[in-house]
Image (cartoon, grey):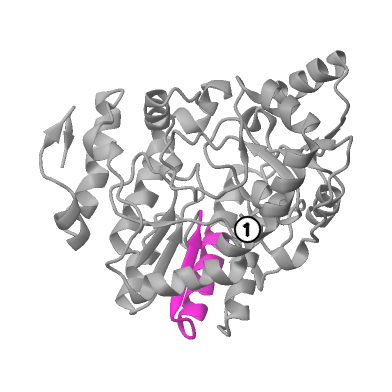
Amino acid sequence: MASQVSDLAKGFGELGIATHSAIIEPNLLHATRVDTVLHRDNFLSRRKWFSTRFRNWLLYSAKRKRLMIEQSKDCDAFIFIWDTFFQDCSDLALLKKMGKKIVIFFMGSEQRWCHAYGQEMSKYKIPSYYDSLNPLDIQFSLKGLKRKIRYLRTAEKYADAIFSLPNQSQLALRPYQHFYIPADTGLIQEKAIQRQVPIVAHAPSKRSVKGTSHVLEVFKLLQAEGVRFEPLLIENVPYHEALRRYSDVDVVIGQLFIPSGGKLERECMAAGKVVLSSVWRKYPDDLPAQCPMIDVNPTNLYQELKDIIVDHSRRQQLANEGRKYVEKYHALQPVCQQVLTALERPDHFDLVPRFFRDEYQPHSQAETAILNQGTQLVRNTNWYQKHIAPGNRAGLIF
């Protein structure tokens, strides 16, 4: 998430708007150009005794609170990605009382609930990436659900604008803006000329989520058939080195499960690469129709990759289209301008979530209680009264 923060800060700067950017912890594999790093791990190292960790948690929390107080003196708007200043999100209410504008960017797992995601994806016959995760992961726990609902509903209650995507909004109630993942095209050199024998790269951040085992198996099958290409796996390299490697390949395989792809796919299109990723066009993820990504999944990856490797003219056509698409929808200035427009037009939105209100079936009474408690938090808001029909369904109270 650190690179998203620095991207937005740079984009607003290009629009002439001063910012102060802060992150919890730098990611060594991503570009991080920010003003403040909170260095959570320095306070909360797991090697320390519990008593020390508790004291350090208080110190770390105080540091975050000081940052909010300091920046509230000069800042008119606060943009949050993945987290807020306070663990219980109560800072959003305080900022609202101060008259500050609040913008929330949802990125994925901080609001995506495994059971709701699986139910919705099954409607479209899309495999759930949660099937590859450890069932003991906190993503499956009620504790994890409580955290997600607290953050989601508090954001829905206090934010002036929310940016998200349908594939992560199964629990959402409030209408929101489409999130166009920012890509810093200024850092990305376009090399759109396709080799006759292409280099095909796969760069997973997490193998199980990206479908890496399927990708590597397809590489082996195609090589055994004598299809001429050079496979390349890119992992655990710093951000700028990864960008350099992307610029030297011809084809990039992103991910195979979650619809629409992520930041990697946008950066590679900007670099003039042919991109294969899990678009799942049958899923209503509000992806622009002119997006030049090739739609792949575990079932069709073999044939789609084989076809594009041998079709040089089609590869060249798609490579030429990528950067224009990214510059139109994902370049930093258009993304940041979208935020400013959303703040000027608070009643305008792109998407109205319906799945949670109309379809989701909770798995247990305990889960239902957590969900109903979250709904209670936003029931009296103006947007709720306007967009959410009252009623009871599957134990859920609206």
Residue 298 appears left or right of 141: right
367, 10: nearer the viewer: 10
The answer to which image quadrant residue 123 occupies is top left
Give the overall secondary structure of the magenta segment: helix
| Residue 290 percent across, percent down from the top left | 55, 50
The answer to which image quadrant residue 221 occupies is top right
Residue 358 appears left or right of 215: left
The structure residue drawn at horizontal position 48% and vertical position 62%, both measured from the top left corner, is: 80
Farthest-out residue, front = 313
Is 348 placed above or below 256 here? Answer: below
The structure residue drawn at horizontal position 43% and vertical position 44%, both measured from the top left corner, is: 111
| Residue 248 percent across, percent down from the top left | 87, 48
381, 365: nearer the viewer: 381
Q: Which residues are magenta?
A: 58-82
Q: Amino acid at mark 1?
A: Val
324, 242: nearer the viewer: 324
Determine if the magenta segment contains residue 36.
no
Residue 283 appears left or right of 376: right
Please identify the quadrant where the C terminus is shown: top left
The structure residue drawn at horizontal position 31% and vertical position 23%, both measured from the top left corner, is: 363
Determine if the magenta segment contains residue 59.
yes
Question: Residue 329: in sight, yes or no?
Answer: yes
**Count of numbered circles in the view:** 1
Is 205 placed above or below 96 here? Answer: above
Please identify the quadrant where the N terminus is shown: bottom right
Is 224 placed above or below 33 here? Answer: above
The residue pinned by badge 1 equals: 326
Question: Residue 24: in sight, yes or no?
Answer: no
Q: Residues within 10 Å of mark 1 (few under 14, many from 20)?
A: many
